Image (tube, coloured by chain):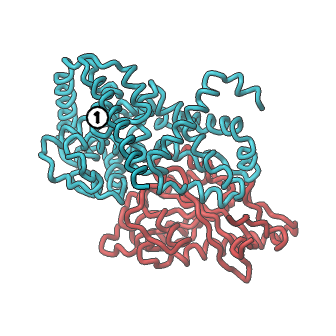
Amino acid sequence: MSKDDEYDFLFKVVLIGDSGVGKSNLLSRFTRNEFNLESKSTIGVEFATRSIQVDNKIIKAQIWDTAGQERYRAITSAYYRGAVGALLVYDIAKHVTYENVNRWLKELRDHADNNIVIMLVGNKSDLRHLRAVPTEDAKQFAEENHLSFIETSALDASNVELAFQNILTEIYRIVSRKALDTSSDVIKPTDGQKITVSPNQEDANKGGKCC
Amino acid sequence: MTDTKTARDLLDMNTKMSRFEKFRRVLSEPNVDMRELRKLSWSGIPEELRPMAWQLLMGYLPCNSERREQTLARKRKEYAECVAQAFARGEAGLDQTIWHQIHIDVPRTHPHIQLYQQTATQEALERILYCWAIRHPASGYVQGINDLLTPFFQVFLSSYVSVDTDLEEFDIGELPEEVLTVIEADSFWCMTKLLDGIQDNYTHGQPGIQRQIGRLRELIGRIDAPLAQHLESESVEYIQFSFRWMNCLLMRELSLRNVVRMWDTYLAEESDGFSDFHVYVCAAFLIKWSATLRKMDFQDMITFLQSVPTATWTDRDVEMLLSEAFMWKTLFHNAPGHLAHRK
């Protein structure tokens, strides 16, 4: 078993938002430190993982990137199962992608776990001269809807690391607080099969075989 | 050694020439025998004859040679009118939701092939996709349909350039405008015919794809039980990896060149090549990696399956895949009872 298969917590996080806002590039920037101006559109879902450290615990994020087009929602909602976090992404230079945030929130309310942690992400912050969504507006909207909020640029890498770090930490805090409250050994944040949030190391170490 | 190689090359060339002759004979009949053409096409169509063969197999070009000129003229005119009408009031007159989606997807179509990065190509693709979308409101434009258009575009383009041209590097600006218009119209109609046969892949809830995924799962259970069990024990769901296989007809998994060869066979498979037969191809494709997959856990399998190593695939690999699919189809297709009882 390789080193990066050892982890204390495994969290499933989904990336959602309108088509073309940069979800796939946020994922590739975070997991591979890559940005690709010429990437193909995502069909169905794509998947990547990365582990980070919080409070000396290794948290492995299993991130599912989804297709943004409306027609796919009937399918993609199936991928929300088991997700403990969602990055809801819009493009700061395309106001309509911000207007659609409400529809995505409804989508999550209808299909995801009630306790899912949601972070609103204004991507493409490098496009300063094209900004169509003021930071203050989005910030206020996030507060009113109890979401965390950040602006990122997958292109110049600003805040990408921080965005994932923040949401994973937030999920970790909730899960470890719950662990104290209920003092049960194994906490399943949702009914998903793949996500077993387990506070003790022995249980958590069943990672993958390496090929 | 050199002699053996030369001998083999000669043999290859002879086979090719004799196949070419057979095709030419069938295609030059005043009334093309479609059964004969299908039979020949299943094993691959010579490049030079592919544009004509595809148009016949798609039912776009009439079998009767006397009707061809008139039919093509009418169809091309009809498409030109559709474009003129749709774009009469410029971009502002377009359905903004549909147009926006097409407009952001076209530049993301084969981003690494030069031909598709040229403005003239992109504008042609946009017009085709937009006209198709407004004529098919039940599905509208769905991401991935852009991929399905390109084999037609590229094959029909090949009619108008010399055989040794690398189409992927071709400068579309070299074509006279009226030629591009013809390629565009023919691509539109053939894509329309293709999508007519698989329309429920793209309507609400994508029932065609859901059904195909279910069928793939069932087939794997019958053909490769150890793999099926392994996928299940690792909680891999078929929709997680095979949705794209169905939605884009494996175009994201194989090179465009491979796909063109594959479509020779799909087109030769009566009416169900792009639906039923495709599922058998997907089954053969998955089983190809069975030994590798069975050593992997959930995460490695999903990662592997979203970028399957086919970069070095040649026509031979595709032909092997198609033969395997044919074998499974022959075994299982008309024997659902046989399928059900084996479990």
Foreground residue among B50 and B102? B50
Answer left or right for B314 relative to A132: right
Task: Identify which residue is drawn at 60% across, 76% down.
Answer: A165
Answer left or right for B240 relative to B20: right
Q: Name the spot of residue B286 as percent of width and height, x first.
A: 61, 46
Q: Quadrant of the N terminus of chain B?
A: bottom left
Foreground residue among B279 and A120? B279
Q: Is residue A127 above or below residue B20?
A: below
Q: Secondary structure at mark 1?
A: helix
Foreground residue among B129 and B244? B244
Task: Identify which residue is drawn at 27% across, 31% down.
Answer: B52
Q: Which chain is cyan?
A: B
What chain does mark 1 sit on? Answer: B
- What colour is chain A? red
Where on the picture, by quarter, is residue A65?
bottom right
Q: Name the spot of residue B116 as percent of width and height, x first.
A: 29, 54
